[in-house]
Image (cartoon, rainbow, N blue to C red):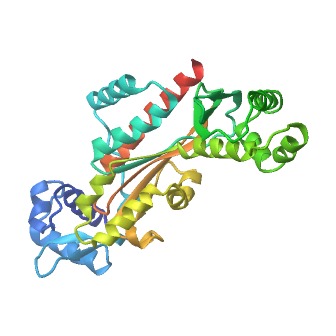
């Protein structure tokens, strides 16, 4: 059990180090003025914190830096989200108001803005909702070689995907498929439609429609495209500021990880399912070794109309946890407000 003064010393070390990135001496803590004690007393407290593994000495200098164990203790026991000034809140709201035109803009701009405000990498997952319903289905011929499948959803989104026109396809076939979809699946939830595409629908198409093109496969690809567009990553180049100890190949693999939605969802799924207000993974707590020098702050959100998603920030282990968490929470509020606006339109 740490004493109140030891808690203050550890909090000061982490606060100063995440701000300046330099080893912390006892004099630095005395100058900060939060603790009424001599430099010698502070050194004794730092020695105790070092013995229990919360901080460590850098080379032969007298300065200390936090360990992964120290960051974990801080996150679990001392971290408080930093309040964002009202002027910054207004700036965030104004930015979102000026750049939101479609549903996807809500998530894209949230990721962009968080990345800009934190100088880290932001990841936003739009809600994976089973409540969204298919409200209209159309197939448009674009030219002699291409056609477009349009899916309209009850949240005012329109998703589209282009395909090459199958050989021998007739206009009557397009009418048949469009009529079939509107009669049988329009009005159903996306989960129901996608499940039907993998189970009953292929046999129904074979039985009731005369054609030689794989409609269910095209539709599955269209719905899969809709699902894939829910993950937004911004600020990947910011990682380069924290990869000086990584080899070029490792940096490339890190970029590939961020480009692979499946890998990201596997990494973050437990965070997305969590009921906590926030969750933080630090350093060697990751199963993925590429991330052992990083931390991930994740804030889940839930909208009553559209479902669950999350906002996450990936940065170095010495990230400014308090201000990063404060920014994410403000963006969460703004994102939920925007989703409500779309529902009410």
Q: Residue at x 45, y 52 (%)?
A: 298
Instruction: Classify the position of the C terminus by image quarter.
Output: top right
Task: Kindly indicate the quadrant of the structure image that contains residue 167.
Answer: top right
Instruction: Estimate the x, y position of residue 57 in percent, counting from the top left.
Output: 19, 77
Image height check: is 269 above or below 205? below
Instruction: Classify the position of the N terminus by image quarter.
Output: bottom left
Tell which residue pokes out farthest to the top in this image.
345
Left or right for 59, reference 210: left
Nearer to me, 166 or 87:
166
Nearer to me, 195 or 34:
195
Image height check: is 7 above or below 109? below
Image height check: is 310 above or below 67? above
Nearer to me, 31 or 327:
327
Instruction: Estimate the x, y position of residue 180 in percent, counting from the top left.
Output: 82, 31
Left or right for 127, reference 72: right
Is residue 2 visible in the rendered image? The answer is: no
Instruction: Estimate the x, y position of residue 114 in percent, counting from the top left.
Output: 35, 42
Task: Kindly indicate the quadrant of the structure image that contains residue 290.
Answer: bottom left
Is residue 30 visible in the rendered image? The answer is: yes
Instruction: Estimate the x, y position of residue 248 in percent, counting from the top left.
Output: 28, 70
């Amino acid at each position: 059990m740490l004493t109140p003064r030891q808690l203050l010393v550890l909090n000061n070390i982490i606060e100063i180090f995440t701000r300046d990135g330099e080893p912390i001496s006892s004099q630095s803590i005395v100058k900060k003025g939060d603790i009424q004690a001599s430099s010698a007393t502070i050194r004794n407290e730092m020695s105790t914190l070092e013995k229990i593994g919360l901080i460590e000495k850098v080379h032969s200098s007298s300065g200390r830096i936090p360990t992964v164990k120290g960051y974990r203790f801080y996150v679990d026991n001392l971290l408080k989200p930093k309040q964002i000034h009202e002027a910054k809140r207004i700036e965030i709201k104004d930015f979102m108001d000026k750049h939101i035109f479609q549903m996807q803009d809500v998530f894209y701009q949230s990721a962009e803005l968080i990345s800009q405000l934190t100088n880290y990498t932001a990841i936003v997952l739009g809600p994976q909702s089973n409540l969204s319903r298919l409200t209209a289905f159309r197939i448009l011929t674009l030219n002699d070689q291409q056609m477009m499948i349009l899916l309209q959803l009850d949240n005012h989104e329109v998703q589209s995907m282009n395909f090459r026109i199958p050989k021998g396809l007739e206009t009557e076939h397009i009418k048949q498929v469009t009529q079939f979809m509107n009669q049988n699946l329009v009005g159903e939830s996306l989960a129901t439609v996608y499940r039907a595409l993998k189970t009953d629908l292929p046999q129904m198409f074979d039985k009731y429609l005369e054609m030689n093109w794989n409609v269910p496969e095209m539709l599955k690809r269209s719905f899969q495209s809709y699902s894939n567009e829910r993950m937004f990553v911004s600020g990947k180049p910011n990682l380069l500021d924290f990869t000086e100890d990584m080899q070029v190949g490792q940096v490339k693999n890190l970029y590939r990880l961020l480009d692979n939605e499946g890998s990201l969802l596997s990494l973050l799924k437990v965070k997305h399912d969590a009921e906590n207000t926030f969750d933080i993974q630090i350093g060697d707590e990751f199963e993925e070794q590429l991330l052992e020098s990083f931390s991930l702050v994740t804030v889940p959100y839930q909208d009553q109309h559209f479902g669950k998603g999350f906002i996450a920030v990936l940065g170095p282990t010495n990230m400014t946890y308090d201000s990063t968490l404060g920014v994410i929470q403000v963006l969460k509020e703004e994102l939920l407000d925007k989703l409500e606006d779309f529902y009410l339109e």
